[in-house]
Image: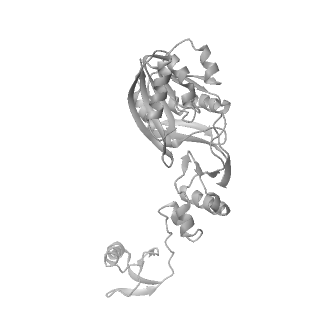
């Protein structure tokens, strides 16, 4: 490799001049000895001593996941691959199209190299069943599906094979937490591993009742309560909210209903358990807010209550034309 040879004390100034003039070869590393430095060049710059040296090539750092797949997948295949993925703690979960099934190992290895996480899994099914879990296939790294995810200063331990958790709701959880007042009594009807309760109780002095039908989710929620220093308190229940709620002796200032596919079927329970002027944080999958607002209004009218809509927003896109929507409603 052609190099400009300069005394070591002149190395940095010479490097800058050659870079500014466009004469330095940026694909190789500069080499230095005890007395001289050797700067790779493409041509023979005037006024310098030129020598031949063996230099180490620069490692090319990919700017994105797609760059790592160049040469392995065609440009059309890369275009069709969803390069966004869920990162949960030190685990990455990919969604790979059926037509790239035969390239899944290449894609998994590239994701491991790019993200530098512990394990790469791919989705094998949609979220299903009453416990809201999906099938995952291990692709690359270490096959260990237990991790600790950090969010807004909270630590959330979980097994991605056994429970549902979406890191994409972090902003929504923070928004709800910031709207909570100290002293509130809160019910999370479908709490999972407890991201809403943990984030809220870590920052607010509240009493939270957390319910989920998935035994594994409640197991990890109990661990997460111990993992975090909480200002508030969390009481956990494992079971169907319809059955569990029969034992409740109190009403709640706030009820969180983040089960967007089925939450509307539990609105009758929520409007009966909510305090006067209490707030329901209601979620569903829809192309608009009108459907959810009407469901809230209908459930309240059944028991002689009224609804004041405080806020609506799109939390995230779930499919073309459909959103995970949130509606904040005060119940009177």
* Nearer the observer, 176 or 227: 176
Question: Would residue 241 be visible to someone looking at this image?
Answer: yes
The quadrant the C terminus occupies is top left
* Nearer the observer, 141 or 92: 92
- Residue 265, picture quadrant: top right
Counting every numbered tag in the picture gives 0
Measured along the vertical axis of the image, is residue 64 above or below residue 249? below
Measured along the vertical axis of the image, is residue 254 above or below residue 144? above
Residue 132 x/y as whole percent:
63, 37
- Residue 13, picture quadrant: bottom left
Side (left or right) of 204 relative to 72: left
Question: Would residue 202 be visible to someone looking at this image?
Answer: no
* Nearer the observer, 168 or 13: 168
User: What residue appears at the point 61 percent right and 15 percent down from the top-left corner?
Assistant: 246
Side (left or right) of 24 relative to 146: left
Residue 270 x/y as whole percent:
52, 21
* Nearer the observer, 260 or 25: 260
User: What residue appears at the point 42 percent right and 29 percent down from the top-left corner?
Assistant: 328
Visual colour scheme: one colour
Residue 280 x/y as whole percent:
46, 25
Residue 45 x/y as whole percent:
34, 86
């Amino acid at each position: 490799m052609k190099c400009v040879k300069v005394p070591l004390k002149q190395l940095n100034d010479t490097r800058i001049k050659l870079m500014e003039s466009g004469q330095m070869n940026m694909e190789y590393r500069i080499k230095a000895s005890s007395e001289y430095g050797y700067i790779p060049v493409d041509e023979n710059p005037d006024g310098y001593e030129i020598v031949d040296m063996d230099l180490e090539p620069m490692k090319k750092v990919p700017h994105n996941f797609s760059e790592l797949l160049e040469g392995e997948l065609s440009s059309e295949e890369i275009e069709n691959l969803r390069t966004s993925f869920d990162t949960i703690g030190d685990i990455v979960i990919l969604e790979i199209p059926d037509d790239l099934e035969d390239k899944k190992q290449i894609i998994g290895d590239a994701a491991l190299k790019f993200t530098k996480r512990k394990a790469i899994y791919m989705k094998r099914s949609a979220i299903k069943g009453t416990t809201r879990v999906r099938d995952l296939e291990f692709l690359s790294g270490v096959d260990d599906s237990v991790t600790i995810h950090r969010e807004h200063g909270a630590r959330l331990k979980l097994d991605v094979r056994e429970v549902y958790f979406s890191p994409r709701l972090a902003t929504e959880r923070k928004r709800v937490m910031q709207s909570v007042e100290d002293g509130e009594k809160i019910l999370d009807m479908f709490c999972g591993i407890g991201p809403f309760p943990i984030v809220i109780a870590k920052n607010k002095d509240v009493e939270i009742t957390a319910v989920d039908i998935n035994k594994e989710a409640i197991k990890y929620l109990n661990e997460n309560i111990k993992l975090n220093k909480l200002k508030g308190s969390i009481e956990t229940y494992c079971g169907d909210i319809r059955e569990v709620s029969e034992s409740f002796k109190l009403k709640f200032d706030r009820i969180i209903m983040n089960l967007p596919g089925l939450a509307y079927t539990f609105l009758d329970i929520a409007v009966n358990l909510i305090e006067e002027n209490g707030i329901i944080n209601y979620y569903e999958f829809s192309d608009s807010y009108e459907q959810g607002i009407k469901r809230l209004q209908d459930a309240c009218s059944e028991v002689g209550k009224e609804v004041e809509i405080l806020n609506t927003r799109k939390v995230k896109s779930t499919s073309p034309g459909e959103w995970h929507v949130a509606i904040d409603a005060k119940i009177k």
